[in-house]
Structures are given as C-alpha cells and as structure tokens.
Amino acid sequence: MAIHASPAIAMPIVVIAIAQLFGTALWFTPNAVIGDLQQAWSLAATDLGWLTGAVQVGFLLGTLGIGLSGLADRRDASRLFAAACLLGASANALLPLAGGLWPAVGLRLITGLALAGIYPIGMKLMVGWTPGRTGLGLAWLVGMLVIGTALPHALYGLSLLDAFRLPWASGVWGASVLALIAALMIARLGEAPEVAVAKVSAHGKRPTFDLSVFAIAGYRRAAGGYFGHMWELYTLWALIPLLLAQAWPGASPVGLALGSFALIAIGGPGCWLGGWLSQRIGSRRVAMLGLIGSGGCSLFYPWLTGAPPSVLVIFLGLWSALAVVDSAHFSALSARACPSHLLGTGLTLQNAIGFGVSVLSLILLVPLWPLLGEWLAWLLLPGPAIGLWLIGRALPNTTQNA
C-alpha cells in the first residue's frame, strides 16, 4: 500500500518504520527459540511466560521512568532511540550465554527497558515527522513493530533449513545486529526540523513527574481503549506458536517457526490497511472496528475445534490481524488530544500502563494453557469488550475524526 505523502515526509516515514522493524526484533527472541532453550536449560513449558513477562516488566519500568520524568519531552527523541537500540542489542546478544532461566530473565528485563526507548520514542519521532497525517504514519510504524515482533520466528526457521543450518543462537544474534542498524539509521535521520527548534527551550529543565495529561478527557478515553486492547494482544502473540502447533499437528519445527512468523507478521499489512482507512473514516472508527473484530475472534475460536487445519490457520491469521489493526489509532487519538509539550509524556505513559496490563494478562493467562487449551481465548475477550466500551464513549469533536 503506497504512502501518499510528499518526498520530504515519505522518506522519514520509511526510515523510522524500518528502524522500528529492526529495533523491535528484540522483543520476542526467546519465543522463537523456546524449544532449544527448554533443552539447553531444562525449562518447563510455562517458563515462556517468565521470559516474555520480563520484557513487559522492563518495558513498563522504562516507560514509567521516561514518562514520569518528562525525559521524552526534554531530550532528542532520535538520540534516545539510538541509545536504547544499543542497550537492547547488547542485552539480547548475551542471552545465549545466560546459561539458565533467571539470568535470562534479568537480560530480558534489560531488553524491555531498552524497548521503552524504541517503541514510544519511535512514535514521537513519527508524529514529529508527519504533521497532519499522524494516523497514517503511526500505522506504518506499528505495522513494522508487528513484523519486527514476528521476525525472530523467521530467523529461527531459516536457521533450521538445511541450506542455512546454524546454531539456534544465530537467530538471537541476528536480532541484535538489526537493532544496531536501527540505531545508525535514526542517529543519521535526527529530529524533525520543527521539533528540533521547539526543543531548544526544553533542554535543561528538571524532571517534572507531570501527570496532567490524564486531566484531558479525550486522552483518557483513547488510552482506556488502548488498555483493553493490550489485555489481548501480547498474550495472543505469545500463544500463537502453541495455538498453531495444536491446529497443525505433525508440523515440522521449520513449519511451526515460519508459520508463527506469518501469523504474527500478517498484522503489519493489517496496520497499513488501517492507516489507509483512517484517512477516510477516522482513527476512532478504525479502532472500534479492530476491537469488535478481535473480540469476535476470541469468542468464536474455541468453537472451531475439529475444523481442518487450513481453516484454523486462516482464522488465526484473521484474528492476529484484527488484534493489532487498531493499535496505532489509540496512539493517534491520544496524540491529537495532547498539547505538544506533553506529547512524549502522554504517549510514553499510555504505553507504560498498557504494557502493565499486558504483563498482568501474560502472567495470569499463559500458565493456564495446559489446563484450558483453546478455551483460553475466552479469557482474552474482556479486553476488547472493555476497550470498545471506553473508546465508544469518546467526546464528540475531540477524537471523532482523528
């Protein structure tokens, strides 16, 4: 889907989106190699929840620190992004050398802290470079986040092929190399010209711990929709390899790895479609359609048990796309509601609380997989339902056409 923007805007969109793809490849590296980690470190199946949850906790702590201190609005976003990529690449590269669960959990916590300077700060960069086209720009950025999240599964799957057979650690290290490239790309791009000028007066100010953004009704309601969305999204992504293995019995490790990549990565084109739609029907309606669609999938999936594998896999792909198509538009609505001097703080705090919700969902729900199997989908449904109720109450003329 083409980016309809002037060359001066289109090039930064491409650079930031690709850097986001490479930087967020750090997010789910243990999920892609969990089978090898279980053998190497004698892990239980439920330990996947610890490794995934540690990243979310690190992300939560990092976004709270950046958001409450006002750092996102006092320092150049490009420098923060590049530094975070360097930190995350280093922590991720050490993962194969951890030797056991708890050192690995510590490294994943550091990786989550680094991702706090990649994802929301990348959003702030995109907003600065796409004035008046925030929904479209953020849709491209989140689409790349989705593909970056799925990328470790592809790297691992390729490493298993006879033509590319490499140690499992190569997929992990490949993600670190991509993060280093992302750091170089954003360091070279720098700040949007208008943002760079505005930041001159902000440098040197003390941390403020400013929570005044929550006094803005449009921000509260957009953020509330995001929180419901986050109850479902990351737990669904963590469950996709398990759901795929159940839906496709007898699949090879390569098939499961590449299939998991495809099922998560399909959300990228879904986000781009959502960005295109937002230019026609508004971000609020796109967000509501995504919540309705993903909630419906979580409701109906358990009843498909016994269907042919092809039907189950197609349905999982639809569910995965609908679960993330709305993500960029909660941020677009929040960005529109925030004054410029609180933009970085508002986006970062929204991410912090949203990922706190995802940590709770992961910790509570993933360990229930051996007991509930596909019926676990019903425990994801409250997220889209509550998010739809909250964003559906948005004030007229505040977020309706964002």
Image: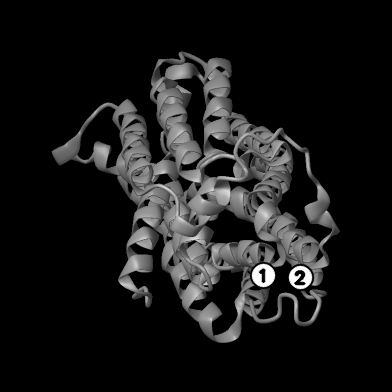
Residue at left 67%, top 70%? 291
376 or 226, which lies in front?
Answer: 226
> As shown in the figure, which amino acid type bears the numbered disc 2?
Ile
Image spot of residue 306 (x, y percent)? 54, 64
Residue at left 46%, top 52%? 145
Work out whether 216 lies above or below 125: below
Q: In the shown orientation, is residue 110 left or right of residue 71?
A: left
Image spot of residue 10 (x, y percent)? 35, 67
Q: Secondary structure at mark 1?
A: helix
User: Is any atom of residue 317 visible in this view?
Assistant: no
Instruction: Evaluate if marks 2 and 1 touch, with contact meaning CB atoms under 8 Å apart.
Output: yes
**Residue picked out by circle 1:** 291
Q: CA distance from mark 2 to mark 1?
A: 10 Å
Residue 26 position by quadrant? top left
Residue at left 54%, top 86%? 280
Residue at left 48%, top 18%? 41
Image spot of residue 82 (x, y percent)? 42, 37
Question: How busy is the neighbourhood of tag 1: few (under 14 within 10 Å), some, or many (20 plus)?
Answer: many
> As shown in the figure, which amino acid type bears the numbered disc 1?
Leu
Which quarter of the image is occupied by the N terminus?
A: bottom left
Question: How busy is the neighbourhood of tag 2: few (under 14 within 10 Å), some, or many (20 plus)?
Answer: many
